Image (cartoon, helix red, strand yellow):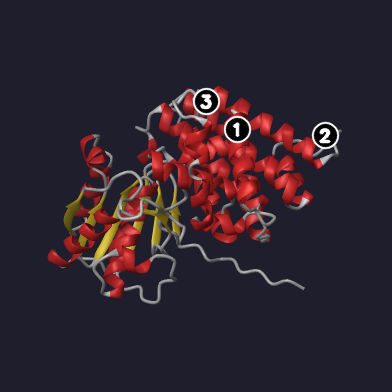
Amino acid sequence: MSAYMWNTFCPTLFGTGAAKETAVQAKKLGMKRVMVCTEHALIEFKVATQVIDVLKDGGLEVFLFDRCQADAPSEICDEGALFVRENKIDGIVAVGGGSTLDTAKAIGIIISQGGNTIADYYGIQEDKHLMKLITLSTTAGTGSEISQWAVIADKETGTKEMPVYKPDMAIVDPVLTYSLPAGPTAATGMDVLAHCMEAITNKNYNPYGYIFGKEGIRLTMKWLPVAVRDLGNAEAREKMSLAANIGGMAISACGCSIGHSFSQTFGAVHHVPHGLGCAWALPATIRYSAKYGKAENILEVADALGLSNSEEKDVQKLSEKIADIITNLMKTLGIKSIRESGYTLQDCLDVAKLFAHDAAFANSPGAPGMDEIKAFITDVFESY
């Protein structure tokens, strides 16, 4: 008999207009002097300002830290911790994409542990949680608003590291995603699909994660093309926000897999958006999982895609059908291939040596050595 752990997700307030409750929720957590952790562009485009106005109207003191950047650089995390101490902050409200939310988590770790740099806390579980954190995502992709992991780009090594700090509350308001352009909408949406498919096909079976993963696949396949084609479609934005959130639940239960190892290593070296790297890797991930993982996992993905009545019973051939569905979706979304983006096969293979350091790699089916990693990367390059 096996035992499984779930219900590990942070409380989530979901729905159109939910951000208007941020001040109420912050006060419930005991916040008075709040750091809004965000990106400068989200201030310019008046996305994060919506949350700032709510906090101020609610009587909270607001201190703006808008230095967050893509890939969550470790030095920005350290600067954020210093900002917290200088301003005697007692709570953090993070508004942004995955990198911004991860930066806020890293700041929470540093402050709670009484340290000065996030580099001291890579790969360890949090043992103190003194800094309260509310997360609001402005993309429908990473699921970072509820996950305990922070993906941080280390300044010294250039690698992605994954310290742990769980948000105290996630507020998912699709309104905050309305201004996201088509390209980032497509890329972050493909990250949702990667989360859900990788959660199902890696070696960490958990029935709770599978339930969320399958529903996330269904929602993404139906609503992501609509969201990209019609950016003002409120229903599509809400459905993709839901898909992203439950995709975060899926990986919280099961973790990611070798596809994320490609995205995180290649992204660390070439600064490619995370969702784009996940999209490129996903067809090869499905084929890899069919070869080295459990057949029933591929059948679960096929069922979520409406292929449960397929006459094809060979799992490897079925994985090819799934891969074709993924590549056709990317074409529909207008996602450029790796070649079209200017990268060579050698550029891709150069990151093979970094895979073993990536946290998602341990979840990969089989026991991949360097030969299997290079074969996988070659498939990634040739798939799309």
Where is the C terminus found, in terms of image quarters? top right
Residue denoted by label 1: 222
Of marks 2 and 1, the one in the foreground: 2
Q: Which residue is mark 3?
A: 333
Q: Secondary structure at mark 3?
A: helix
Residue 86 has which mark? none
Q: Earlier in the sequence, mark 2 or mark 1?
A: 1
Task: Specify the amino acid type for callout 2.
Answer: Ser
Above or below for 28 versus 185: below
Marks 3 and 2, how far apart in space? 25 Å
Quarter-wise, where is residue 301 in the image?
top right
Q: Residue furthest bottom?
A: 127
The residue lying at 84 percent from left, 34 percent from top is: 312
- Mark pair 3, 1: CA separation: 12 Å
Q: Is 361 placed above or below 173 here? A: below
Which quarter of the picture shows residue 326?
top right
Q: What residue is drawn where x is 60% and y is 50%?
A: 370
Look at the image and tell me whether residue 132 can be seen: no
Give whichever of 211, 273 is nearer the camera.
273
Q: Few, some or many C-alpha atoms within 10 Å of disc 1 (few <14, some 14-19, many ≥20)?
A: some
Residue 163 spot, x, y in % from top left = 41, 63
Image x and y of residue 142, in percent: 46, 47
Q: Amino acid at mark 3?
A: Leu
Left or right: 181, with 244 as reference point? left
Between discs 3 and 1, the one toward the N terminus: 1
Q: Is residue 194 left or right of residue 169?
A: right
The x, y position of residue 40, in whole percent, is 22, 41
Instruction: Look at the numbered disc 1 and give the secondary structure of its residue.
Output: helix
Residue receiving disc 2: 310
Amino acid on which disc 1 is placed: Lys
